[in-house]
């Protein structure tokens, strides 16, 4: 869930590292191959990646399962950048997880590295199943770290010791 005009994104290793399992003993997460990105950039916004910890962001753009998948390393950050006034859940980004047996190049900055995910499962480096990455965009002023606002709270009160003081207040987020 995000409520920011400039979300920090999450590292791929943080999103998938704790979920990663592989039938090969000692296997580790290498990254993901983005295989489907149907988010509407005009109505919803864009899935983006950053290979320099959020300094520069690039649109994932058009990808597909097969030779046009985009290789993104574990330290790469991904995020969804909504168009102004978009709220709700954008179309998911679909990926295949890659293990350390992938020996090709990874995307680095604006230099995209495509990978062929035509062969999946053991013994390939690409997961047999796909994973959907989803998020929810909250309207401005809601959710996230927006503190609640109280109204109708008395500015001051004089109450004797041992007495109870009560009042009604309205809270909004």
Image: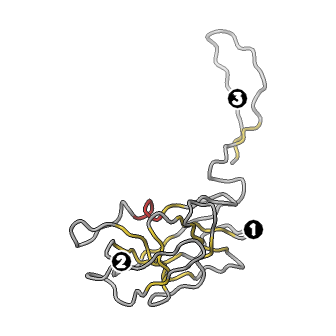
Quarter of the view holding residue 165: top right
Real-space Cα distance between discs 2 and 3? 63 Å
Q: Is residue 101 left or right of residue 32?
A: left
Q: Secondary structure at mark 2?
A: loop
- Marks 1 and 3 in Cβ contact (< 8 Å): no
Q: Which residue is mark 2?
A: 102
Q: Which residue is mark 3?
A: 167
Q: Earlier in the sequence, mark 2 or mark 3?
A: 2
Q: Is residue 100 left or right of residue 85?
A: left
Q: Secondary structure at mark 1?
A: loop
| Mark 2: few/some/many CA within 10 Å (<14, 14-19, 20+) | some
| Residue at position x 74%, y 67% in the image | 85
| Rendered view: 68 above or below 43 | below
Q: Secondary structure at mark 3?
A: loop
Quarter of the view holding residue 33: bottom left
| Residue at position x 31%, y 75% in the image | 101
**Residue 104 or residue 40, whichever sits in front:** 104
Residue projecting furthest to the top: 161
The total number of labels drawn is 3
| Mark 1: few/some/many CA within 10 Å (<14, 14-19, 20+) | few
């Amino acid at each position: 869930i995000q409520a920011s005009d400039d979300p920090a994104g999450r590292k791929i290793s943080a999103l998938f590292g704790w979920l990663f399992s592989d039938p090969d003993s000692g296997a580790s997460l290498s990254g993901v191959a983005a295989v489907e990105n149907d988010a509407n950039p005009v109505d919803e916004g864009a899935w983006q990646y950053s290979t320099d910890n959020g300094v520069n962001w690039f649109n994932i753009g058009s990808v597909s399962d097969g030779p046009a998948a985009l290789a993104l390393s574990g330290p790469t950050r991904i995020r969804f950048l909504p168009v102004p006034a978009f709220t709700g859940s954008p179309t998911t980004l679909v990926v295949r997880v890659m293990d350390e047996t992938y020996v090709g190049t990874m995307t680095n900055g604006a230099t995209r590295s495509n990978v062929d995910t035509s062969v999946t499962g053991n013994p390939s480096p690409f997961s047999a199943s796909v994973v959907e990455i989803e998020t929810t965009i909250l309207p401005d002023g809601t959710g996230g770290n927006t503190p609640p606002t109280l109204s109708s709270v008395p500015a001051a009160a004089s109450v004797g010791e041992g007495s109870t003081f009560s009042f009604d207040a309205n809270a909004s987020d």
